[in-house]
């Protein structure tokens, strides 16, 4: 996480802040060093859970305990401390049971809700000369896990020497953290932050205790801001400090059987290493069918180890044998600390046990193969969201323009990852589909691509009319005059017609203006019945020529609603007047659309092995829905686009020579103003963006 710094002048006083300092410290210790996971594990595995639900330490993160040590013992300790022959460690062993008496022990356990360890101790002598040079005389919180405690036993009374420990309660400390003062740089800490507290709306007067000789204060130094107030000139403040962290075992058992507190301040990384060496009580509090899984990938319980082995190997006997061997080798998981160490251990086991010079057994090779498959799966899962090694690192996370360290703008991105250089400008290319498909074909022709034109009307007296096209126009609507195609069954019918796989019933509908139209050819009209009959066979030849010539073909999926005749064929768009008794409204599923486009592709591929299909999804929404009794047109449109997008995904995944062009995503997400005034059709600038993306994805050389 990047450090975010800021500066502010308050009442003429300059403050330097680290805005996310508290979060950096918390993540560093709780997450990266595993303190939070370990603490939660110890809480689940602790044998005695009769903890107090609340006490002053739990509520305020700070508490005073009186008469921890007697005044006589404190006086003796001060004398011993000033002696050159003072044996700290030996003396500490007599002091710990007195300091961590039943009252204090109960408060600490209830705070952690688990056992705890004493990690280090320190006898401290503070004088007025310590005032300026030392960080602990400035307001701060201690860097460390969010749940740890410090015990300070005062060996002489605050009323005698005039020194103390000042606190700001949790509420004020939280405000200071949010402002960025807590965990600012050491040289930016201050003895007096009353102006900052007043600016934040709090009473700036700190809290303190009147401590007698032998009294102690317990507090969470991460939760409450504090500072040492040095004694009066000529006086000395004597204290004994202890640092406590959650532990799987009681402090006295650790002290006697494992290790004793260090006579110095230890780093929390070193403390965690020591704590991790301690045995973890069996997770007997968990039910047999409950598995405790660490959030950091650490292996912490026997139950979890067995579960991991069962996820790797299918042979139960082998799982049991390997489990027993690992527990015997490493009962506290000091070596097999995480999944990667477990995999390495298993690899070494195979290396040592498989008779590489002799005859391999299927038993061994099967288990080895399962380990290899598990490791590969683990790597894929672990690196899934990792930008390193990805074709487009910006493609993983949603573009967030307000991100503090890596802002991105979706309007500056093209929504694809992999390029497929399948063509040049000379490659024969054609297209079919909705009105958006025509916009694509138009730009391809304008940009001088080798757009296949198998059927063109040149004669101004022709009795065949293509809507939006004048005889002799240089730019045609599509490669052949099949008209606009809005649904996937119509693509299948086009291929079936071209290669004589099915002979559809010839139908001609009379439309206003004295014209006729073929309901399978939307926006194509005939001035007479003879014109239709004369055009029919030549049109089919043109379709066939298009499919045999094109090496790349772009289709645009438009709707998942269609109208079908009783013979199962689909109209290319909506029915004409007078046809309602012949047709039925259908809503196509994902599998329906996959089936129709797959058949379209397979038929053409049979006759043209070089044929490659680029699928796009039209961003143009419904004009109307046939589901008005149950769905709003906007709702029906969203369903339609979702169904067609999923169908396109399945088709591309299942076919080598199928590709997806994310025009829908570019228009609806990555373009600021894509729509014309009707809020349905896209602007020419947006179409050009789609073509530019097409070139970038599929064209090898566009010079």
Image: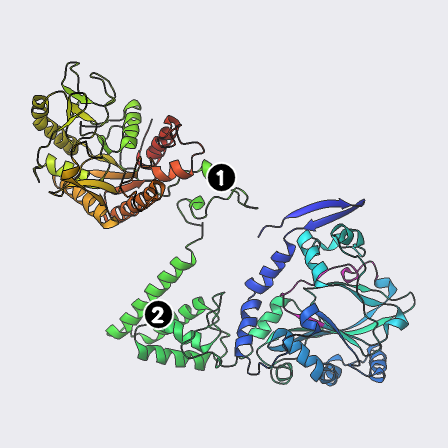
Q: Residues within 10 Å of mark 2 (few under 14, many from 20)?
A: some
Q: Residues within 10 Å of mark 1 (few under 14, many from 20)?
A: few
Q: Which mark is residue 312?
A: 2
Quadrant of the image occupied by residue 443: top left
Nearest the viewer among 462 and 63 is: 462
User: Does 701 sit above or below residue 90?
Assistant: above
Q: Earlier in the sequence, mark 1 or mark 2?
A: 2
Q: Which mark is residue 409?
A: 1
Specify whether residue 148 is painted magenta: yes
Measured as percent of width and height from the top left, residue 461 is found at: 15, 14
Q: For this view, does 299 lie left or right of residue 622?
A: right
Cβ atoms under marks 1 and 2 closer than 8 Å: no
Q: Residue at x 68, y 80 (%)?
A: 105
Residue 453 visible? The answer is no
Nearest the viewer among 629 and 37 is: 629
The image shows a total of numbered marks equal to 2
Which segment did they paint magenta? 131-150
Nearest the viewer among 31 and 516 is: 516
Label 1: element kind: loop
Specify whether residue 658 is painted magenta: no
Q: For this view, does 521 lie left or right of residue 370?
A: left
Residue 381 visible? The answer is yes
Label 2: element kind: helix
As measured in the structure, the alpha-carbon distance from the residue carrying label 1 to the one carrying label 2 is: 42 Å
């Amino acid at each position: 996480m990047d450090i975010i710094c800021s500066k502010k002048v308050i009442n003429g006083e300059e403050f330097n802040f680290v805005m996310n300092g508290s979060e950096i410290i918390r993540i560093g210790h709780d997450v990266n060093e595993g303190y939070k996971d370990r603490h939660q594990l110890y809480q689940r595995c602790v044998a005695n859970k009769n903890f107090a639900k609340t006490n002053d330490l739990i509520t305020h993160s700070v508490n005073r305990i009186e008469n921890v040590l007697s005044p006589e013992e404190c006086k003796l300790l001060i004398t011993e401390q000033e002696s050159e022959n003072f044996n700290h460690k030996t003396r500490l062993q007599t002091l710990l049971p007195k300091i961590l008496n039943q009252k204090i022990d109960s408060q600490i356990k209830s705070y952690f809700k688990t056992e705890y360890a004493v990690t280090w101790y320190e006898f401290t002598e503070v004088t007025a000369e310590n005032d300026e040079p030392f960080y602990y005389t400035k307001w701060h919180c201690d860097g460390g896990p969010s749940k740890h405690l410090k015990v300070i036993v005062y060996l002489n009374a605050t009323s005698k020497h005039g020194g103390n420990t000042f606190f700001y309660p949790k509420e004020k400390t939280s405000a200071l953290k949010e402002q960025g003062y807590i965990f600012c740089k050491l040289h930016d800490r201050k003895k007096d932050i009353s102006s900052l507290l007043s600016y934040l709306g709090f009473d700036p007067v700190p809290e303190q205790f009147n401590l007698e000789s032998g009294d102690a204060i317990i507090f969470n130094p991460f939760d409450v801001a504090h500072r040492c107030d040095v004694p009066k000139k000529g006086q000395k403040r004597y204290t004994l400090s202890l640092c406590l962290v959650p532990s799987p075992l009681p402090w006295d058992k650790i002290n006697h059987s494992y290790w004793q507190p260090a006579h110095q301040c230890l780093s929390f990384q070193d403390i965690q290493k020591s704590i991790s060496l301690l045995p973890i009580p069996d997770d007997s509090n968990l039910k047999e069918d409950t598995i405790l899984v660490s959030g950091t990938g650490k292996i912490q319980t026997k139950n979890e180890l067995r579960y991991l082995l069962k996820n790797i190997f299918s042979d139960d006997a082998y799982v049991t044998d390997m489990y027993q061997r690992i527990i015997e080798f490493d009962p506290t998981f000091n070596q097999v600390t995480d999944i990667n160490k477990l995999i390495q251990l298993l690899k070494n086991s195979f290396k040592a046990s498989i008779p590489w010079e002799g005859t391999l057994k299927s038993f061994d090779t099967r288990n080895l193969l399962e380990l290899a498959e598990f490791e590969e799966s683990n790597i894929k899962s672990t690196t899934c969201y990792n930008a390193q090694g990805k074709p487009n690192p910006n493609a993983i996370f949603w573009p967030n323009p307000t991100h503090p360290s890596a802002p991105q703008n979706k309007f500056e991105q093209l929504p694809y990852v992999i390029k497929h250089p399948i063509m040049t400008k000379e490659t024969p290319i054609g297209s079919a589909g909705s009105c958006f498909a025509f916009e694509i074909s138009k730009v391809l022709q304008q940009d001088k691509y080798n757009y296949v034109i198998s059927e063109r009307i040149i004669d101004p007296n022709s009795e065949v009319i293509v809507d939006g096209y004048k005889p002799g126009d240089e730019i045609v609507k599509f490669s052949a005059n099949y008209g606009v195609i809005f649904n996937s069954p119509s693509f299948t019918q086009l291929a079936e017609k071209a290669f004589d796989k099915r002979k559809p019933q010839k139908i001609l509908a009379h439309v206003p203006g004295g014209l006729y139209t073929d309901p399978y050819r939307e926006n194509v009209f005939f001035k007479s019945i003879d014109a239709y009959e004369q055009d029919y066979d030549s049109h089919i030849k043109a379709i066939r020529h298009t499919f045999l010539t094109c090496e790349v073909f772009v289709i645009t999926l438009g709707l998942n609603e269609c109208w079908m005749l009783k013979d199962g064929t689909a109209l290319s768009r909506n029915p004409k007047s007078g046809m309602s008794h012949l047709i039925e409204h259908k809503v196509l599923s994902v599998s329906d659309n996959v089936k129709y486009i797959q058949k379209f592709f397979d038929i053409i591929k049979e006759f043209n092995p070089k044929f490659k299909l680029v699928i796009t999804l039209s961003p143009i929404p419904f004009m109307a829905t046939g589901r008005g009794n149950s769905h709003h047109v906007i709702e029906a449109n969203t369903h339609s686009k979702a169904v067609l997008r999923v169908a396109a995904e399945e088709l591309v995944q299942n076919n080598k020579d199928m590709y997806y062009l994310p025009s829908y995503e570019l228009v609806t997400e990555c373009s600021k103003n894509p729509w014309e005034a009707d809020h349905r059709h896209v602007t020419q600038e947006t179409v050009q963006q789609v073509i530019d993306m097409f070139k970038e994805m599929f064209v090898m050389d566009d010079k």
